[in-house]
Image (cartoon, grey):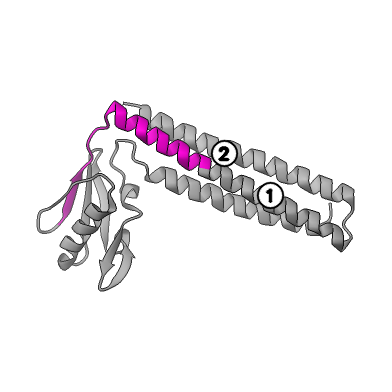
Amino acid sequence: MNDLIKKQLDDAKGTMEKAIEHCDNEVAKIRAGKAMPSMLDGIMVDYYGNPTPLSQVGTVNTPDARTIVVQPWEKNLLQVIEKAIIDSNVGLNPQNDGSIIRMNVPPLTEERRRDLVKRVKEEAEKGRIAIRNIRKDANEKIKKLKTDGVSEDDIKVGEAEVQKLTDVNIIRVDKLSEVKEKDIMTV
């Protein structure tokens, strides 16, 4: 296979890997009824005028399956962290006791579980769309290589390889989605 085509395939593979990673991170943020520090990953705290990830201004841990505890490294950040959690709309009610912030993760209702599964499916679809867009870009770049003297056969082989890569990665997205759905629907 032509070196130019190999380079396009490697680029596509790396970009698809990032798309899978992004999809995995988005799906991980969707809570499944168990307390997990990752539920607070997207929360930014106003740290002396700079938006800073919550995990960089305190310790986030789970003493049990239903509780998340945030212990800020500076006491004066308690109210700021509490406000950031409320504003983030993650569905948790922070309780500030003066030294830590404690949040109880309520058990999920059947209706809420269905909503979460719907969100997981939406994220998975976004992942599949991203992978298909990467395939389209890679195929366009491979077709443009014809002007660089790459043969028709090599272009066809390159497009077939991109399609194989696409199929493999869409299956990975489906598996991520399937595992998360099972996790959410397990009572």
Residue 66 in the image, given as x and y percentages of width and height: 23, 38
Q: Position of residue 83 (x, y in %)?
A: 20, 58
Q: Which residue is mark 2?
A: 172
Q: Label 1, on which residue? A: 136
Upstream in sequence: badge 2 or badge 1: 1
- Secondary structure category for the residue under label 1: helix
Q: Quadrant of the C terminus?
A: top left
The kind of residue tagged 1 is Lys
Q: Tell me what residue is drawn at x 39 percent, y 32 percent.
A: 183
How packed mark 2 is, by other alpha carbons closer than 10 Å (few <14, some 14-19, many 20 or more), is some
Disc ID at residue 39: none
Q: Position of residue 60 (x, y in %)?
A: 27, 53
Residue at x-position 28% and y-position 41%: 35
Horizontally, is 148 left or right of 121 in the view?
A: right
Do we see residue 9 in this rendering? no
Residue 48 is a magenta residue: no
152 shown above or below 66: below
Secondary structure state at the residue bearing disc 2 = helix
Q: Which residues are magenta?
A: 100-125
Q: Is residue 106 magenta?
A: yes
